[in-house]
């Protein structure tokens, strides 16, 4: 269970949001919405523990994440707005490198399955610098299949994706929720997913 109570945040002395509450249990997700500059990315960084709130608290399974970071980060997959992939590496190498950093084994078969699920068959060994913006985004999103985590926190994951890729990724999120996962997602697009809490900033 992921919960946040009475979160507030400011940047450069300017208030972004205040009084934000959130509670997600297994199989639930939240859609964070707001205009550019409203603080969506700041909220997600607070939920991950990468930034601290001005006030309020985030808890994972009842424990404050500030006092139990290891357990929280073990159960967390955070994908930021900017694709955290290396241009000189191939999609396959990028997935391997990301898992190696966290000390997680990743076999070629699992990595290839993830890339092909995201429509990258035939591009697995092509340097990322030769891929389109949408294909680069798909390399990043393939991490949802190679990095086990109960909680997904995803900042604008649908950027540069076409309609087919949006539907396919939404299906993957639905599968994650059906397994008891949790997701917090920012997106300017409407996600074709049932349910979901709305968090408006």
Image (cartoon, rainbow, N blue to C red):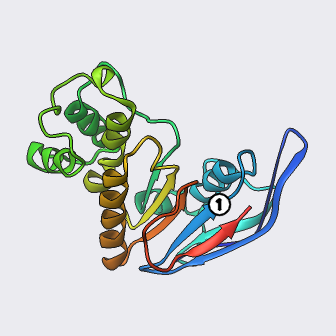
Classify 10 Å Cα crowding around label 1: few (below 14), some (14-19), many (20 and above).
some
Residue at the limit of the structure toward the right, as seen here: 13
Instruction: Locate residue 22, reporting x and y percent.
Output: 65, 74
Relative depth, front residue between 74 and 141? 141
Residue, x 45% and y 50% (percent of image)? Answer: 158
Residue, x 22% and y 31% (percent of image)? Answer: 93
Task: Say which residue label 1 marks.
Answer: 33
Helix, strand or loop at label 1? It is strand
Q: Would you place residue 184 above or below residue 164 in this image?
A: below
Image position of 47 (left or right of 84): right
Residue at the limit of the structure toward the front, as seen here: 163
Res 148 seen here: no
Residue, x 32% and y 48% (percent of image)? Answer: 143
Q: Would you place residue 8 above or below residue 135 in this image?
A: below
Res 88 seen here: yes
Instruction: Locate residue 149, reporting x and y percent.
Output: 36, 62
Instruction: Locate residue 2, reporting x and y percent.
Output: 55, 73
Quarter holding residue 87:
top left
Instruction: Locate residue 47, reporting x and y percent.
Output: 61, 59
Residue, x 39% and y 72% (percent of image)? Answer: 181
The image quadrant where one finds the C terminus is bottom right
Image position of 33 (left or right of 161): right
Quarter holding residue 170:
bottom left
Image position of 74 (left or right of 199): left
Q: Would you place residue 152 above or below residue 78 in this image?
A: below
Relative depth, front residue between 145 and 115? 115
């Amino acid at each position: 269970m992921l919960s946040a109570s009475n979160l507030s945040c400011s940047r450069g002395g300017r208030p972004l949001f205040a009084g934000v509450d959130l509670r997600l249990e297994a199989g639930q997700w939240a859609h964070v919405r707001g205009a550019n500059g409203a603080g969506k990315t700041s909220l997600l960084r607070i939920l991950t523990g990468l930034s601290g709130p001005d006030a309020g608290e985030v808890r994972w399974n009842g424990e404050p994440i500030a006092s139990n970071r290891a357990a929280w980060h073990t159960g967390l997959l955070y994908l930021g707005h900017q694709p955290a992939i290396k241009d000189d590496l191939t999609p396959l190498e990028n997935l391997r490198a990301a898992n190696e950093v966290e000390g997680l084994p990743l076999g070629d078969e699992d990595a290839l399955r993830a890339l092909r699920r995201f429509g990258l068959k035939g591009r697995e060994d092509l340097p990322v610098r030769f891929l389109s913006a949408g294909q680069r985004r798909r390399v990043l999103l393939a991490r949802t299949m190679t990095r086990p985590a109960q909680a997904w926190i995803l900042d604008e994951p649908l950027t540069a994706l076409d309609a087919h890729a949006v539907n396919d990724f939404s299906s993957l999120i639905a599968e994650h929720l059906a397994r008891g996962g949790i997701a917090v997602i920012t997106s300017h697009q409407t996600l074709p997913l049932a349910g979901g809490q709305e968090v408006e900033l």
